């Protein structure tokens, strides 16, 4: 089924930049266009590229238009490979008050990915950590009714609860659980929903008096069969069109948390998607047409568990055995400390050529090798024997899965160097 076309922004500034500089387009990436792409993908109009207000569909429509403008050939109608997933969403209220203080969602607190919804006005019950060491205290706690209560625990208690199933099950009877976090708030996505409201709050924002009245309003909606998609376009190879080099990136992100807060996802992964589009613009030019066909795949639902790439490997649009090499692009917005290459320790010969290219041309400050890791969309391919690297940048800003991963603060320190490293490496492979 062809995915619906969704009207996006009244104006698409990238169109004016598409042919901004013929010279830069011929020689490499166009950085004004890169910046505009990242601004577009992180715009409030795309709702964090998640599953509230069809953020993922709007992002896909935007990318479909970009594929068409570049002249990429489709392998399916409208470049689209549809699939479904279950996903827990927070489309309405996400509110927390401690006494007279209203905490700000995304900044002071987040809703845990599997949280249920609910409305509560209670005083909080602090978990006594003696329950982990004192048998009598534990028994008294287990005998205490928790239904309708708001229980507060510390971040360090979570690991201890994992070893105490009776305590964990008893805590699940509370109507709400608040975990006080010492570090940053890191949001995520779940495919299931629990009945309990679960929040994570910065410990520094929590009131000294835990007897203060707690007011919680959270709207949660489990979408059991949400329709989303991958997008695939390609440039036909000059001499070996049935063999493929593949460039991948995920375009989805965490979406919204309540009506007013969304996660922009500039580094993760508007940066990788922008790199993929720049590489597509480069190889779509006749002067750079590769010997092998080169496919550009943007995956949906990576944040929900690599679901888009998993679906593609289970329903490939061309045989996986025809893939000569796959390059996955994720978190490419920094680079002060260079890049890391996942599978670099497994594919030693390919990694050696990559480092030799960098040693000769100084594209990035450093290249570090890493072994097998199930941390991005290369993994389902690697598990099926496809030679694949996953490149990500290191150093610079640390915003990740939070409201601070914004386009305006993304340095793109190594973006140009990574672009040239990739094109030189693909040329080495026969691209």
Image (tube, rainbow, N blue to C red):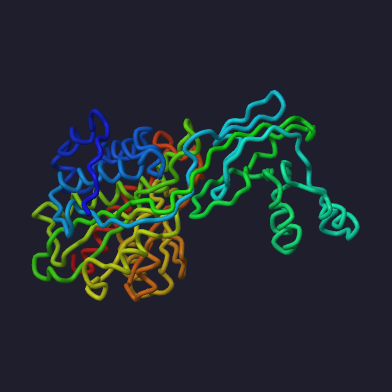
On the picture, is 140 further left or further right than 258?
Answer: right
Q: Position of residue 324 (x, y in %)?
A: 24, 71
Q: Is residue 288 left or right of residue 407?
A: left
Q: For the C terminus, give its image quadrant.
A: bottom left
- What is the quadrant of the N terminus in the image? bottom left
- Placement of 141 over or under 387, stated as above or below: above
Q: Is residue 41 above or below residue 325?
A: above
Q: Position of residue 261 (x, y in %)?
A: 48, 34
Q: Position of residue 141 (x, y in %)?
A: 83, 52
The answer to whether one can see residue 266 in this image is: yes
> What residue appears at the point 34 percent right and 49 percent down from the top-left corner?
251
Q: Nearer the viewer, residue 251 or 78?
A: 78
Q: Residue at x 40, y 44 (%)?
A: 50
Asked if residue 338 shows in the view, the reply is no
The residue that appears at 42% across and 56% down in the rendered structure is: 339
Q: Where does the image place residue 283, in percent across and percent down from the top left? A: 17, 55
Task: Please name whichever residue, 429 or 72, is drawn nearer the observer in this view of the structure.
Answer: 72
Q: How many marks?
A: 0
Residue sitting at x 47%, y 32%: 259
In the picture shown, does residue 234 fall above or below 325? above
Check the image and name the residue furthest to the right: 136
- On screen, residue 245 versus residue 271, left or right, reads left
Name the foreground residue: 225 vs 198.
Answer: 225
């Amino acid at each position: 089924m062809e995915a619906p076309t969704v009207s996006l922004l009244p104006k698409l500034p990238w169109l004016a930049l598409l042919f901004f500089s013929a010279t830069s387009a011929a020689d490499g990436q166009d950085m004004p266009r890169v910046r505009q792409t990242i601004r577009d993908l992180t715009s409030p109009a795309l709702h964090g590229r998640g599953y509230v207000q069809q953020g993922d569909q709007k992002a896909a429509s935007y990318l479909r238009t970009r594929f068409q403008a570049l002249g990429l050939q489709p392998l399916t109608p409208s470049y689209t490979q549809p699939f479904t997933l279950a996903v827990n969403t927070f489309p309405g209220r996400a509110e927390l008050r401690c006494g007279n203080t209203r905490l700000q969602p995304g900044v002071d607190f987040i809703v845990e990915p599997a949280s249920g919804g609910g409305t509560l006005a209670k005083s909080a019950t602090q978990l006594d950590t003696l329950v982990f060491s004192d048998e009598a205290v534990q028994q008294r706690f287990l005998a205490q009714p928790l239904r309708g209560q708001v229980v507060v625990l510390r971040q360090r208690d979570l690991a201890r609860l994992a070893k105490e199933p009776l305590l964990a099950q008893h805590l699940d009877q509370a109507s709400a659980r608040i975990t006080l976090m010492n570090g940053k708030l890191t949001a995520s996505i779940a495919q299931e929903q629990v009945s309990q409201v679960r929040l994570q709050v910065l410990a520094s924002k929590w009131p000294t008096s835990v007897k203060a009245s707690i007011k919680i309003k959270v709207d949660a909606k489990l979408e059991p069969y949400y329709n989303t998609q991958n997008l695939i376009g390609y440039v036909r190879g000059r001499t070996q069109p049935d063999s493929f080099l593949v460039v991948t990136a995920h375009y989805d992100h965490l979406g919204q948390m309540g009506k007013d807060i969304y996660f922009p996802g500039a580094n993760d992964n508007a940066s990788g998607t922008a790199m993929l589009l720049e590489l597509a613009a480069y190889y779509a030019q006749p002067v750079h047409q590769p010997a092998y066909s080169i496919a550009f795949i943007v995956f949906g639902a990576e944040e929900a568990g690599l679901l888009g790439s998993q679906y593609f490997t289970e329903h490939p649009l061309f045989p996986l055995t025809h893939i000569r090499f796959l390059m996955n692009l994720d978190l490419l917005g920094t680079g002060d400390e260079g890049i890391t290459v996942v599978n670099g320790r497994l594919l030693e010969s390919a990694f050696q050529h990559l480092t030799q290219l960098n040693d000769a041309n100084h594209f990035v400050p450093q290249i570090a090798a890493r072994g097998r890791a199930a941390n991005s969309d290369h993994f389902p391919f690697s598990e099926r024997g496809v030679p694949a690297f996953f490149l990500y940048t290191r150093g610079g800003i640390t915003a990740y899965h939070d409201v601070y991963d914004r386009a305006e603060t993304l340095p793109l320190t190594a973006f140009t160097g990574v672009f040239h490293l990739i094109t030189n490496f693909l040329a080495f492979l026969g691209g």
